[in-house]
Amino acid sequence: MSRIQALLPAALLLTGCVAPGLKYIPMTSSSTGDSDSTTTTDGESSSTSGPIMTTTEDEGTGAASHSGTTSTGTEPDTSSTTMTTDDGNPVCGDGVVDGDEECDDGNDVAGDRCHACAKNRWIFATAALHNDPTWGGVEGADSLCRQYALQSGRADDSWKTFIAWMSDADHDVRDRLYPGRGRYVRTDGVVVVASVEQFFSGSIDAPINVDEHDNQDLFGAVVTGTKPDGTAAPGTHCENWTVEKLSDFSAHIGFVTETDERWTMEPDPQFNPVRCIGLNARFYCIEGE
């Protein structure tokens, strides 16, 4: 058996065994004359060193030849194997709120308050019924929504940001609603809309028939003064929600059990608008920033 045949098993052991999870890249570069080499019958020098993970060359030098001895491998330069993945862009899931992220809780739980680094915002129908529209305009309705959110104990500090889904002659609710990036969910976790734009599309994914205390299967009217596109319905809106008069039919309502346009405004003129006194209707309350 020739000397070359005797060396083959050892060479195969060195080049054919790769540790799981590592990507090896065979390199061909020059090294110093201290490499472990074997002279063949042709008089050429061949290294028995195996392939290495990676290597880098000093800028401007390239491969260097020393003492006229050529090697097929070099010792890895550990200083060149450190890599960074931080390119300055925010990374969703790292637990750090950065860039355009609204939140980052470091997990992928879809049903919590943070999903895909966007905030899941609460929306509910009020447990309370409101009879006469003397709550002081849309600002007064917003104030009531904040009180209900605070009393529910669910909204932490965000109770201060709630508004009522309500328009008047001077305000469209689509201009008052904070344009959150995430989904809007009921207090039982059911998604009502996937994005704020869906509120203005004419339909929602689930009825808003759950109140601030997670009481479910509510029914009845909700006072909105708002068309399906988020703009104010025509009329005086009970003098911008300040006046109760038997003769004033300018309150527009929707129904908490509906998911088409009737969730915000019943289109049938036999049922809408209604009298400003004796409404007996709920509000929709939506979390803001």
Image (cartoon, grey):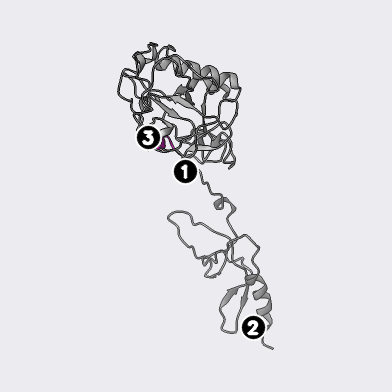
Compared with 203, 3 (above or below) is below
Q: Secondary structure at mark 3?
A: helix
Nearer to me, 29 or 206: 206
Nearer to me, 161 or 139: 139
Residue 188 appears in which quarter of the rendering?
top right
The amino acid at mark 2 is Ile
Residue 264 appears in which quarter of the rendering?
top left
The amino acid at mark 3 is Phe
Residue denoted by label 1: 87
For marks 3 and 1, give the CA distance.
37 Å
Question: Is there CB contact under 8 Å for labels 1 and 2?
Answer: no
> Is any atom of residue 234 visible in this view?
yes
Residue denoted by label 3: 200
Q: Position of residue 135 (x, y in %)?
A: 44, 12
Q: Position of residue 165 (x, y in %)?
A: 43, 25
For marks 2 and 3, give the CA distance.
80 Å
In this image, 107 relative to 1: left or right? Answer: left
Residue at the extreme bottom? 1
Closest to the camera, between mark 2 and mark 3, is: 3
Residue denoted by label 2: 4
Magenta stretch holds residue 161: no
Compared with 100, 282 (above or below) is above
- Tell me which numbered mark, 3 or 1, is placed earlier along the sequence: 1
Residue 174's label in the rendered image is none
Residue at image x 38%, y 18%? 275
Residue at image x 52%, y 70%? 68
Closest to the camera, between mark 3 and mark 1, is: 3
> Is any atom of residue 288 visible in this view?
no
